[in-house]
């Protein structure tokens, strides 16, 4: 238990240190910056990244199995109405300011893990291998990556736009009355046999999810 908690805490401290360092030049206390417009007053910022260019540090993605708090909760918290994170927080009385945000969700998952371990016999203390055994099939970062969707030939440029970080204009919506949207595609993925695209909306600056079957065609490129 101590080893698991230490790993999480060290990771948290590292994350905090990185955030403080990146915010030392100009503080961004809220979403989209001080003026809520996504604009930084800093000068000479990098606008292009490759595997080597403008990279401060990098680390290989771990291939070893991870603990799946959902599978642990299903085994050790069977009386929960469901095992979604907000429900588990409510059942376990875990206070969190917001859901579906990276840092609060990470802290909540850590507390769910502690609660699950607390329901195991204290002696002998459960090992990492014991917890993996309760999770069933091992979960790794590569195995958890989103599946790529099938792309219609008319939408092949979406893949190139994702790789290049290009801004494009698409015709999007239902069959009746689709709209012209200016977006910057980021990720293409499949969920429940349906293709989706995460893209930054040029109008709002927000990252939004779009259904690929509602993209009629790409109107403008670049």
Image: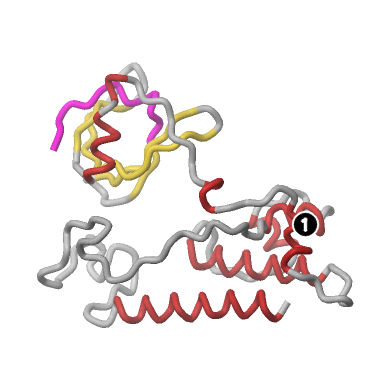
Give the residues in magenta: 210-222
**Nearer to me, 121 or 89:** 121
**Nearer to me, 36 or 42:** 42
Q: Is residue 82 left or right of residue 164?
A: right
Residue 114, image x and y in percent?
72, 71
Position of 144 relative to 29 (above/below): above
Q: Quadrant of residue 219?
A: top left
Around disc 1, counting alpha carbons within 10 Å, would you say few (fewer than 14), some (14 to 19), or many (20 or more)?
A: few
Position of 67 relative to 9 (above/below): above
Quarter of the rendering occupied by the N terminus: bottom right
For image coordinates 27% across by 20% down, the residue present is 154
For image coordinates 32% across by 45% down, the residue present is 186
For image coordinates 28% across by 33% down, the residue present is 158
Q: Quadrant of residue 133?
A: bottom right
| Residue pointed to by mark 1 | 133
Residue 36, image x and y in percent?
26, 63
* Total residue callouts: 1
Position of 177 relative to 31 (above/below): above
Task: Tell me the chief SS of the magenta region.
Answer: strand
């Amino acid at each position: 238990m101590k080893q698991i908690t230490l790993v999480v805490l060290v990771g948290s401290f590292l994350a905090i240190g990185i955030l403080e360092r990146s915010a030392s030049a100009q503080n961004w206390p809220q979403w989209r910056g001080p003026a809520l417009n996504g604009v930084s007053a800093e000068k000479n910022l990098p606008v292009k990244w490759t595997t080597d260019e403008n990279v401060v540090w990098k680390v290989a993605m771990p291939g070893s199995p991870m603990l799946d708090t959902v599978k642990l909760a299903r085994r050790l918290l069977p009386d929960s109405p469901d095992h979604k994170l907000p429900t588990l927080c409510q059942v376990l009385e875990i206070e969190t300011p917001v859901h579906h945000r990276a840092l609060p969700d990470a802290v909540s998952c850590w507390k769910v893990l502690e609660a699950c371990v607390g329901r195991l016999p204290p002696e002998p203390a459960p090992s990492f291998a014991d917890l993996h055994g309760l999770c069933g099939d091992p979960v790794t970062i590569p195995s958890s990556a989103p599946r790529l969707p099938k792309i219609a030939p008319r939408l092949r440029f979406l893949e190139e736009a994702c790789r290049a970080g290009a801004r494009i204009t698409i015709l999007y919506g239902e069959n009746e009355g689709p709209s012209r949207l200016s977006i910057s595609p980021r990720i293409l993925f499949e969920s429940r046999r349906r293709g989706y695209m995460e893209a930054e909306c040029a109008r709002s600056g927000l990252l939004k999810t779009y259904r690929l079957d509602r993209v009629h065609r790409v109107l403008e490129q670049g």
